[in-house]
Every structure is written in structure tokens, then in C-alpha cells.
């Protein structure tokens, strides 16, 4: 019922409350180039199967070339892997951490090969994305299936995954602290709460993908689970970071999107952060606190789209802007990821699992048809009920 799963998850239960003796953790990420010569080959991997010529890829390559051809993501993952290993060691948990990427070395198939060479047969995967959508969840699950096919280890290695952790306290706490500091910075610069706007930014995705994010049997509206999860978390962050002041003043906030890459005729989630900033500035907003809510670390989209383009927009409009840190290797985030693994290791009952919104705790085993990509159809995927 659930391809490639451990026995405990194979029945397709929403939450697996049976302990599983995993051999290792698979840390799975997007990957990124680590030099100028890597940029175009990396972008070919990202866009494989879409027939995009190198000339068009070079239009995107300048983002990476501006940073020496190096994406920060691999360095972030090395740091996260080391932090996870240190936290596991601190707790006395013997679970090695293997690291593999979807689009650049080391690949997920490399991590699966390493697992086989070390005699590991049961892996629990942590995808470095907190939300539900094709690109942030199902595509990882497809890549796990591809890796087992490429290595010819289907049947020898089983892969489960932790639940999507958008509302886990460990993921949310760094953003609460970041917004608190951002608001202090705006106030120190002389801007009143009524002049300040908090922008929660996440990666835009095609509207069709958004509508199909999450399980089909749950109704989330046009933006699907992807938008609903972000909105729910943003509400939690604002409630914790900025309770009403003594005068009852509230600080305005909104969810915005960035990094659109599709053709102009294809609807993607909006508004774009730069468009929102221009409109709000024209209406009197004088300070922005930018929160990269959709990102776990400083991806190129954060460094370019927020730290470069959004800051340029603020400068052009003569307004103040500050960007909140991503979770990165924040102790609460690292500890939270280990807690998510231990939920599965120990078979923690659903009612004992922390979740800060009414949407969670999310599913251990993805539901049938979850996060469909209508352009590509359903490809084999692990850690969820087929298709």
C-alpha cells in the first residue's frame, strides 16, 4: 500500500504510532553549485526533462554568478548535518546522518549507496522543506524512489520520512525571535507600529500545484494546503512576536511570494514581494520586516530575491527594511528535527506530538494523490500511499 516503506508504515496509517528501529537518518536537500563551472550543469539538473536551452539557463545563472557561482545551501547543509550529529550525540542516540541532494553532489542516490555499503536498511528521511506541495514534499518522495531504482536497492532499503514540520515549535521559534528583533530594529530606527508591515515571504508555485497541495479529501481553498499552512504559521508567529501593545496597536502583516520562474501566461501564487512593497509604500508604509517563512536556510532565493532584489526595492522607495534570519542551525530547529525523528523511532502517539496550528500534526504517511503535479502526472513515490 505504501511503496518502499518500513513494515510499521506500510499499512498507510496517517500517523505511525509503532516504534521503528531505524538505522540512519537521510538528510535530503535541493543542492546547489559550488563554483562557476558548476552553475550551468546544476541548472540543467534542476530543469531536466523540460528542454530549456543553456542560453535561457544563463539568464538565471547570474544570480549564482553574483556570489561566485556558489550557492549557500550546501554549506548550510554541512552545518546542519554537523549540528544534528552533535544533538544526537548529546542525547546519546546512535543514528548516523547521511546527506544527499536532489540536484547536485552528493546526490540522494549517493547517500542510498552509502547506506547500503554500511549495512543500513531502514532510513528515516528529513526533507529540508517544511510545507506541503509538489516541489517541497512529493518531489522529494519521487527522488527517494528514483534513488532506489538507480542503485538497484529497491527491496533492500526502506525509506520513511518525518512529517511536514511547518508548525512544529522547533521550526517556528526562530521566526518568532527573528520578528521580535526585526520589530525592535524598526522601532530603533524611528518607525512606529502603524508605519511598519511584516511581510512573510515564501516561494511562489504554480496555482495548479498549490490547489492540489495536501490531501485531496481536505478543503483548503484555491491555495491548497501550501497557502493555508503558511498563513496559519504566520498568525502564530505574529501572535507570539507582537502581542497587542498597551495602546492596543497592531502591526499589519501579509503573506507574499517570491522567485516565480514560470511562463507569464501560467498563473502562480501572488502577490510578488516587490509588487507588495511598492503598493504598501505608496500607501504610507515606511518600514518592512521581511520574514523568509518558506525557507529553512539561506538558499539562493533568500540571498538574491530578498537580500538583493527586495532590499533594492526598499531603497528605491526610500523605506526601511530588515530581513529576519532563516532557522539554519538555530538550536530549537536542530532539536526539533531530532524530536521529529524520535516521534517515529519511539512511535509517539498523535496526541502527544506538538503542533502550533490546528492543521497539525501533519501526516507521517502522505495521503493518496497528495500534492499532484498536473503537468507531470503521478510518478512513483515513497513514504506515501500510491499514487
Image (cartoon, grey):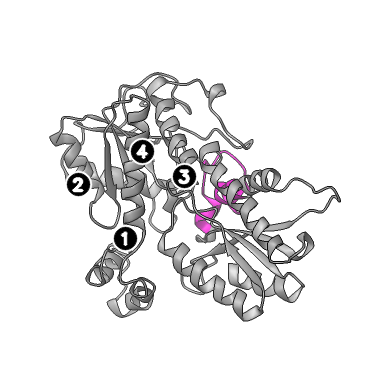
The answer to whether mark 2 and mark 3 are in CB contact below 8 A is no
The mark nearer the N terminus, 1 or 2, is: 1
Q: Which residues are magenta?
A: 208-230
The mark nearer the N terminus, 2 or 4, is: 4
- Which tag is nearer the camera, tag 1 or tag 2? 1
Q: Which residue is denoted by mark 2 in the rendering?
A: 110
User: Where's residue 353, x and y in %?
Assistant: 53, 27
Would residue 366 be seen by someone viewing this image from the given angle? Answer: no
**Residue in the picture at 43% in, 58% down:** 298
**Residue in the picture at 42% in, 53% down:** 135
- Which tag is nearer the camera, tag 4 or tag 1? 4
Q: CA distance from mark 2 to mark 3?
A: 27 Å
Label at residue 262: none
Would residue 339 be seen by someone viewing this image from the given angle? Answer: yes
User: Where's residue 308, x and y in %?
Assistant: 49, 72
The mark nearer the N terminus, 4 or 3, is: 4
Label at residue 84: 4
Q: Secondary structure at mark 1?
A: loop
Q: CA distance from mark 4 to mark 1?
A: 20 Å
The answer to whether mark 4 and mark 3 are in CB contact below 8 A is no
The mark nearer the N terminus, 2 or 3, is: 2
**Residue in the picture at 56% in, 72% down:** 311
- Which tag is nearer the camera, tag 2 or tag 3? 3
Q: Secondary structure at mark 4?
A: helix
Q: Which residue is denoted by mark 3 in the rendering?
A: 330
For residue 222: magenta? Answer: yes
Q: Nearer the viewer, residue 77 or 379?
A: 77
Q: Nearer the viewer, residue 385 or 274?
A: 274
In the picture, measured across the screen, residue 288 lies left or right of residue 166, that is right
Amino acid at each position: 500500500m505504501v511503496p518502499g516503506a518500513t513494515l510499521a508504515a506500510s499499512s498507510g496509517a496517517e500517523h505511525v504510532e509503532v516504534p521503528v528501529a531505524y538505522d540512519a537518518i537521510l538528510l535530503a536537500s535541493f543542492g546547489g553549485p559550488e563554483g562557476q563551472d558548476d552553475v550551468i550543469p546544476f541548472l540543467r539538473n534542476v530543469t531536466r526533462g523540460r528542454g530549456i536551452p543553456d542560453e535561457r539557463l544563463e539568464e538565471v545563472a547570474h544570480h549564482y554568478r553574483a556570489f561566485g557561482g556558489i550557492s549557500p545551501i550546501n554549506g548550510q547543509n554541512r552545518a546542519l548535518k554537523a549540528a544534528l550529529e552533535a544533538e544526537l550525540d548529546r542525547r546519546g542516540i546512535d543514528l548516523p546522518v547521511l546527506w544527499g541532494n536532489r540536484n547536485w553532489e552528493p546526490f540522494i542516490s549517493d547517500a542510498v549507496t552509502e547506506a547500503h555499503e554500511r549495512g543500513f536498511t531502514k532510513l528515516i528521511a528529513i526533507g529540508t522543506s517544511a510545507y506541503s506541495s509538489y516541489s517541497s514534499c512529493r518531489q522529494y518522495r519521487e527522488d527517494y524512489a528514483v534513488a532506489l531504482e538507480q542503485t538497484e536497492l529497491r527491496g533492500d532499503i526502506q525509506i520513511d520520512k518525518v512529517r511536514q514540520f511547518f508548525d512544529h515549535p522547533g521550526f517556528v521559534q526562530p521566526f518568532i525571535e527573528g520578528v521580535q528583533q526585526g520589530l525592535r530594529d524598526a522601532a530603533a530606527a524611528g518607525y512606529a507600529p502603524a508605519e511598519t508591515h511584516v511581510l512573510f515571504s515564501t516561494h511562489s508555485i504554480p496555482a495548479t500545484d498549490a490547489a492540489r497541495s495536501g490531501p485531496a479529501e481536505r478543503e483548503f481553498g484555491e491555495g491548497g494546503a501550501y497557502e493555508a499552512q503558511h498563513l496559519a504559521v504566520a498568525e502564530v508567529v505574529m501572535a507570539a512576536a507582537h502581542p497587542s501593545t498597551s495602546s492596543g496597536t497592531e502591526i499589519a502583516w501579509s503573506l507574499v511570494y517570491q522567485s516565480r520562474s514560470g511562463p507569464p501566461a501560467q498563473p502562480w501564487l501572488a502577490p510578488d514581494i516587490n509588487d507588495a512593497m511598492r503598493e504598501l509604500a505608496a500607501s504610507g508604509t515606511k518600514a518592512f520586516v521581511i520574514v523568509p517563512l518558506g525557507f529553512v536556510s539561506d538558499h539562493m532565493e533568500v540571498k538574491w530575491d530578498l537580500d538583493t532584489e527586495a532590499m533594492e526595492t526598499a531603497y528605491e522607495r526610500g523605506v526601511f527594511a530588515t530581513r529576519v534570519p532563516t532557522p539554519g542551525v538555530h538550536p530549537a530547529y536542530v532539536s526539533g528535527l531530532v524530536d521529529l525523528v524520535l516521534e517515529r523511532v519511539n512511535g509517539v502517539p498523535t496526541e502527544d506530538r506538538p503542533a502550533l496550528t490546528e492543521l497539525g500534526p501533519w501526516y507521517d504517511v502522505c495521503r493518496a494523490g497528495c500534492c499532484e503535479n498536473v503537468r507531470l502526472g503521478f510518478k512513483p513515490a515513497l513514504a506515501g500511499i500510491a499514487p
